[in-house]
Image (cartoon, rainbow, N blue to C red):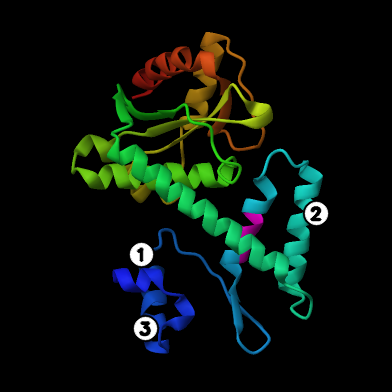
Amino acid sequence: LTLNETRQKFEAMNSTRRKEVIQTLEKEMTPSFASFIAHFGYSNRVCAADVARGLAARLESPRRIPLVERFESARGILRCFMKSHQDYGPLVKSFDKYKVGLESVWTLVAAAVNQQEVLPVGPFFLHSSTHSLDDIMDSRHFVFLFTTFLQRAFSSVRRSRDRTTKPLVVSLALSGDMQGWHIVTGVMPLDTVYKDAQLMSFMGRAFERAAEQANLDVRRENFDPNVVYIRSEDRSRFFDLLQAVMEIES
């Protein structure tokens, strides 16, 4: 895409160029997945994949809103998508919210790379931030997007074998009722991700062993073993033990 095209709406492109963009995205996506386009009235078209992204953002953020309310709101968005004759304002709002999240991810990744905030720690790379996350970023979905985007950007800035063969661990400060806590996650090396179609990861097990050895207060709020919550004051101990655990594993 040219710079001018990145600033214009997709609908403003001619039909030939739109098809070329879609084909390019499908070619570059890893892994690929199936989706479909729904029509609203005569001129509105919505991709099911975008609806799924909007639902994910609404289900997980903001954390200050009770989970039941977030669930009901997400169900309302899905209802708008399934019954196009109804008001689809909530659906459009979810897209706008997701765009804000993507912009926040891009800003954070650019800052982390430009300020060289990704540091080598033995068998892995670590990015640890003490700046509290925005409400939109305070979700597992956007934290995962940030982590994978940061890994690709960090590996592309300078060609180095270590940057593609070592895992990346990310620690981000939380706000609100989770003030004083960090969300910690990790992703496997880029080389491993491309080779392993099953996307298997040992990060969750490494987190668990490090927490057990240090006897730390570690929280889990979902079924994803690769995401844990630790207290701010426990970070240095946790990462020291994580380094020892991963050195043994490797």
Q: Are marks 1 and 2 in contact (CB under 8 Å)?
A: no
Image spot of residue 128 (x, y percent): 42, 28
Numbered tag placed on residue 28 in the rendering: 1
* Above-or-below relation of 214 to 242: above
The residue drawn where x is 41% and y is 47% is 107
What is the CA distance from the residue labelled 1 to the residue labelled 2? 35 Å
Of mark 1 and mark 2, the one earlier in the sequence is 1
Element type at marker 2?
Answer: helix
Q: Mark 2 highlights which residue?
A: 72
Amino acid type assigned to the residue bearing label 1 in the image: Glu
Mark 1 crowd level (few <14, some 14–19, many ≥20, 10 Å Cα) = few
The Cα atoms of the two marked residues, 1 and 3, are separated by 17 Å
Q: 136 or 162: nearer the eye? A: 136
The crowd level at tag 3 (other Cα within 10 Å; few <14, some 14-19, many 20+) is: few
- In which quadrant of the rendered image does the N terminus lie? bottom left
User: Left of 88 or right of it: where is 150?
Assistant: left
Please give the name of the residue rendered at 59% of the width and 21% of the height, measured from the top-left corner.
180
Q: Quadrant of the C terminus?
A: top left
Image coordinates for residue 109, horizontal then vertical, percent: 38, 44
Please identify the quarter of the rendering in which residue 110 is found.
top left
Q: Which residues are magenta?
A: 51-56
Please name whichever residue, 7 or 106, is drawn nearer the observer in this view of the structure: 7
- Residue 130 is left or right of residue 75, and the answer is left
Q: Are marks 1 and 3 in contact (CB under 8 Å)?
A: no
User: Which residue carries the number 3 mark?
Assistant: 17
